Image: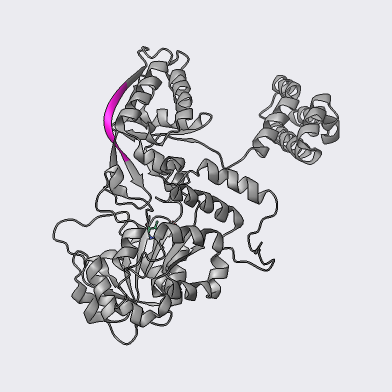
Amino acid sequence: MSSTNQSARFQKLPSTDELLRQRDLQALIERDGHASVAESVRVVLARLRQEIAGGRLDDTALNLALSGLSSAVERQLRQSLSYSLRSLVNATGVILHTNLGRAPLAGAALDHIRATASGYSNLEFDLTGGGRGKRDMHVDRLFRRLLGDDARTADPGSAAEACSGAHSNSTSTIVVNNNAAAVLLALNSLAEGGEVIVSRGELVEIGGSFRIPDVMQKSQAQLREVGTTNRTRVGDYEQAINERTQLLLRVHRSNFEITGFTEQARLDELVGLARRRQLPLMEDLGSGALFDLRSVGINGEGGVLDSLRAGVDVVTYSGDKLLGGPQSGLISGRADLVARMRSNSLFRALRVDKLTYAALEATLLAYVKRDHDAVPVLRMMRLSKNEIERRAEMVVAGVVSARSQRLKLELLDGESVIGGGAAPSAVLPTRLIAFTHADLSADELNARLRGSEPPVIARVEDGRVLFDLRTVFPEQDGVLVNVLSSLAGPRLA
Ligand SMILES: *Cc1c(COP(=O)(O)O)cnc(C)c1O
């Protein structure tokens, strides 16, 4: 009995071709192409067949489904053609959020990408001579201006001069895929087959499984640990130096701090030791700021220039952390050492594309012009608590039925986090919008925010949802007004 019903139901289903000939599907085909619409039709029909086979559709339900076939196809089509990578609102207050794409790009960077990547460019072409050019010269010239040709200590009688030849004082920079690649390339170029001395207090793991000992192994250099987790003195490095030693390495701790009974060799002590023993000193800075963090009230975090001026021979840092540019890894330092990295075949494997060069060049130009507000992460860092509070008040005032008993909104003092491997204690004072809902827990609220269009990512603390406008672009404030209004509205069960 039921099997005859079932076969009757199967027969009611149109064929793919019949469905595709329908007028409203023709319109979809014109817009999105025959292949993708046909695929959506097949998916929808297969789903219906499955439901019939599973006995989940009676005649009434089937008729309903058949009458809504074309809109089901349209929904399926929209879903299958929608982007997976989407833009969203970062209301967490974490400026460099690795899960949210780290640094947003400057407008000029996007313009430059569009202008140079939508057609051909002189990526590796010398317009003056007409011959082959080098892709790194597009940004190396800007790094030279920013870091100064003589950024590293220009002490003419120094040992560095003696051991590295005439060009020891010029600073060059190369670009690879990310800072992990930069560290790998630098270690392999400078210390393959030899030993690298690192403090036990700096054997860090950065999110996404970047571990110094592992990268060291891949680079074919041997890790020589010195000191203890909490205390390492310059004498510990000195004692470990032997004929196999190729490099002294300092690593920024990035995502943790050691407090209490601690000691770390000072940078100037390491520089002195490296010069005396004629060894290069490298520093993995991680975030590597090109501006003075003290200008936004963050002390004790040296930038790229501080390290080079102190006499560090090579520094590595990310392009999409404090620098505020595209994902990339930068290696800046003594020209002769950087030249060894450039001629390493690994460099070819780790090189970046024209999009990255375009974005980096435009970002660096903003630094050259001292136009710090053009770089979004710098602008966010420079926002005052007062400005954030003023915007937060406007958002709260804009919420329709803000006086509803369901949604309780208030403003609180709090802290924004730099993130992305700046010191974990590097925080900026801010003003937060905090809210709770009568019918929804903070986690349920958060899930609704993630599901809204565009998604809004917030922090949850102490049973409250928190918005920090420091990381919200002012033109997105309206999105927050709308999403809060809909949460305050009466239609929530
Ligand atoms: C972030 C970080 C890295 C990894 O940089 P990516 O650009 O993410 O590859 C390496 N070292 C340190 C110290 C870092 O902070």
| Residue found at the far bottom of this picture | 243
Quadrant hosting ligand 1:
bottom left
Residue positioned 82% across, 35% down in the render: 16
Q: How is the image coloured?
A: one colour
Asked if one can make out residue 376 in the rendered structure from this viewpoint, the answer is yes
Q: Quadrant of the C terminus?
A: top left
Quarter of the figure with residue 137? bottom right
Q: Quadrant of the N terminus?
A: top right
Asked whether 47 falls inside the magenta stretch, the response is: no
Q: Is residue 187 left or right of residue 158?
A: right
Spot occupied by residue 96 in the image (x, y as percentages of width and height):
40, 46
Asked if one can make out residue 8 in the rendered structure from this viewpoint, the answer is no
Q: What is the magenta range?
A: 410-416
Q: Is residue 277 left or right of residue 128?
A: left
Q: Is residue 298 left or right of residue 471?
A: left
Spot occupied by residue 265 in the image (x, y as percentages of width and height):
21, 68
- Relative to 479, does residue 239 appear above or below in the rendering? below
Quarter of the figure with residue 388? top left
Asked whether 413 falls inside the magenta stretch, the response is: yes
Residue positioned 33% across, 68% down in the render: 312
Residue positioned 64% across, 63% down in the render: 124
Nearest the eye: 118 or 108 = 108
Q: Specify the principal SS of the magenta part.
A: strand
Nearest the eye: 3 or 210 = 210
- Relative to 222, does residue 380 appear above or below in the rendering? above
Nearest the eye: 32 or 269 = 269
Spot occupied by residue 338 in the image (x, y as percentages of width and height):
46, 71
Residue positioned 65% across, 35% down in the render: 79
